[in-house]
Image (cartoon, grey):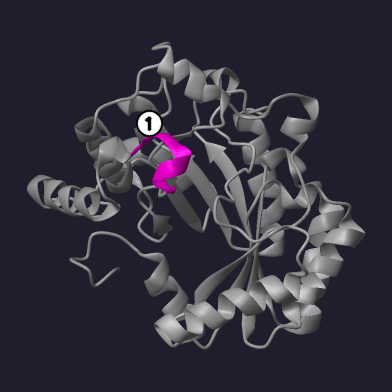
Amino acid sequence: MNSEMNLYYSYAEYLKEKYGEKVYKLPVNLPVSCPNRTDGAGCSFCADEGTGFEASDCHMPVQEQLERSREKVEKRYHARRFIAYFQNYTNTFLPLESLMEYIAQAGEIKDIVEICISTRPDCIRSDYLEAFRNYRDRTGIEISIELGLQTVNYHTLKKVRRGHGLAEFINAVLMIEPYHFPVCAHMILNLPGDTMEDACESARILSALPISMVKLHSLYIPQKSLLCQEYRDGRIKICSKEEYLNRLAEFLALLRPNIVVERLFSRIPEKDAAFCNWGCSWWKLTDEWKELMQQKGYVQGIHYDYLNGAALNRWGM
């Protein structure tokens, strides 16, 4: 558990345990889109540039993107080992041959120990997983997969035009599990229409599945998004900062203790956002969350007692 007040199992701690030292992600932006954009306008909370607000040009060679990022990170953090992070859009929406070529290029960079592939639950298929396993076995470079779920409330998923439901996520996780790739689930705990109950149920469902990590996002609304117009017209309501912090605390209290928590809040350049983090800095939100956890006497997993025959256990059977 994280030495930072022992509140949660941090990504930094996990990486240090796995690789023996600090490891840093280097973003890669590939020339790929998303099936949800091909079929329509995409998720209502997604901007035209996806999550790549500060990403390199997608037409820049993968190795050049990585070398440029590596140079900055090495100088600032004295880093020696790295993860090539295929971050933007839906990377498995590329033809398999093309994706594997990009993976091979990233793996040729010195001191890359892992390739992290961000994608959607409805873009996982066995031939891709087989190719990833063959690459890992051949090179010794780890493959990890990030899946965007955002909420377990399938009504909310439909409202935000996510293009898939909860079943597709469960199916993807179960497909990946035999290959032993670490899986990270992306979650937004304050989507319009979601409640505290949804946040709590999200923690329960993730804990019941073979999930390795979770990346939590506080909802931000990009200027160039469908949700932005709804927000400005007053057609959606975003929960208060205090409500989000309470949802975050309850989520973590229910989360299986060995699930790695990669992030607690989102960050986006101010110029790109119509709304982000209630106008608070990331550091202020973190401090307020820590104080709330201490007040409640919470650490990650303190309420993880609801699986594995919970009723029988309660009755001493």
Classed neighbour count for the residue bearing mark 1: other residues with Cα under 10 Å, few (<14), some (14–19), many (≥20)? many
The residue under the point 68% across, 35% down is 168
Q: Mark 1 = which residue? A: 190
Q: Nearer the viewer, residue 123 or 161?
A: 161
Q: Position of residue 114 (x, y in %)?
A: 63, 74
Residue 71: in sight, yes or no? yes
Q: Position of residue 176 (x, y in %)?
A: 69, 54
Horizontal relation, residue 183 to residue 230: left or right = right
Judged left or right of residue 187, residue 31 is right
- Say which residue appears at 77% left-offset and 51% top-offset: 92
Image-based side of 158 in relation to 302, left or right:
right
Q: Quadrant of the C terminus?
A: top left
Q: Quadrant of the N terminus?
A: bottom left
Q: Which residues are magenta?
A: 268-276
Label 1 residue SS: loop
Nearest the camera: 119 or 208?
A: 119
- Location of residue 281 in the rendering, given as x and y in whole percent from the top left corner: 26, 49
Counting from the top left corner in percent of width and height, residue 278 is at 28, 35
* Residue at left offset 35%, top offset 34%: 200
For residue 317, say whether it is visible. no
Report the side of 286 relative to 147 (left or right). Answer: left
Q: Quadrant of residue 130?
A: bottom right
Image height of 246 relative to 253, above or below = above
Q: Is residue 218 above or below residue 59?
A: above
Q: Residue furthest front?
A: 271
Identify the amino acid type marked 1. Asn
Please say whether residue 147 is one of the residues in the magenta stretch.
no
